[in-house]
Image (cartoon, grey):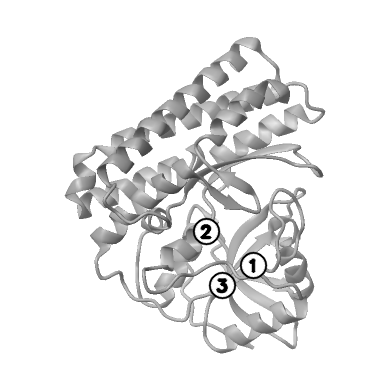
Amino acid sequence: MYILNWHNLTGVHCGSVAIRNVANYYGVNYEEALCFGLGSGMGFFYTKNKEGKPSEVIHLRAPNMEPNFFSNSNLKYEWIKESDFNIAENKLIQDIKNGFPVFLQTDIYFLHYYNSPIHFPGHVIVCIGVDEKRKVFYVSDTNFKEIQEISFTDMRMARSSKAQPYPLYFNHFKITNFSPFRDLKEKIEKSIFYNSYNYITGQKSERGISSIFTILEWINNLERWKGLKDSSETFKFAYQIIVKRGSKGAGFRYIYKDFLQIAEKESKKVKKLNLVDDMEQIAENWNNIGLNLRSLSKRQSKKVFNELIDLCQEVFNKEYLYHSKILDSFGDNKKGA
């Protein structure tokens, strides 16, 4: 059996907790909100599923947050895909034996400790150990205090799930070394700029395109949601994504607000822009959107639906003003995270 010398930290969101744990493994203690912000984690996806339920979904996190956090001008990380499960499994085992924690994207449907009746692909865990005799991997996962066991068979299925909207191909990457950022202020300012730049210009992934303008597409299609065969489930799942599922509420906007509070202490430029108050208002808007979605999942109401449309238009306007302000203020930064 091989298992890393691991002090397991728990938190709110799978990706940012994973980042924090890996950094901590290498002796660097960053708060979870800082990890989320330095990975430029805010986004918005809207996807129509050809198969499975709910038939249409939203997601409010940007792609590639985990590799973004560790990347710099000299070294760029990215999710690596594999086409063969034997190769993927052998690489994972060897990385663990070499002492490296490995980021994995999984579908929680196949992680037995969740007992999930629905698929949720893209869930990030960190593999930290393996027992080849028992054929189990040991993983660190979000808010579980104890290290979890996953059988080789379940891990294969979790890593290769083709559930929509995010099919997986044994996505992984490892971190072989990590030190504190030499210039945290610069990293913070660049991360804030990159998040806004990518959100305005759009980021592609297997899930689709993460973009502020995708919110408008979603708004234009909300009327259709009332007529979907799984209308109630679709509204409910959207509510859960915004308010419940590992985001600290408001679709990750509250955790990003916490990041901006940290950023203010490091950067006078950030503090001067009053970004915390802006994000607080945006977060409250998203939370109210979530509550209206929950209400509509229980009972259709013209009044509540009209309120939902107004709130969505309002949050788009607030987010557009916020991100435009960032681009205007940090425009001297290099584009293209």
- Residue at the disc numbered 3: 173
Compared to 4, does 142 lie above or below?
above
Measured from the top left, where is residue 281 in percent x and y?
A: 37, 30
Q: Secondary structure at mark 2?
A: loop
Residue 55 placed where, x, y %? 76, 37
Disc 3 marks a residue whose amino acid type is Phe
Location of residue 230 (image quadrant): top right
Label 2 Cα crowd, 10 Å radius (few <14 / some 14-19 / many 20+): some
Which element carries disc 3, helix, strand or loop? Answer: strand
Q: How many marks?
A: 3
How many C-alpha atoms fall within 10 Å of the one at disc 3: few (<14), some, or many (≥20)? many
Residue kind at label 1, given as amino acid type: Asn
Q: In the rendered image, which residue does mark 2 sit on?
A: 64
Res 152 → quadrant: bottom right
Residue 10: tell me if it is visible: no
- CA distance separating discs 2 and 3: 11 Å
Image position of 123 (left or right of 61): right
**How dense is the environment of label 1, judged by Cα within 10 Å: few (below 14), some, or many (20 and up)?**
many
Residue at 53% across / 77% down in the picture?
101
> In the image shown, does 159 or 329 lie closer to the viewer?
329
- Could you tell me how far apart the alpha carbons at marks 1 and 2 are, in whole angstroms? 11 Å
Residue that mark 1 sits on: 171
The percent coordinates of residue 161 (x first, y second) are 76, 60
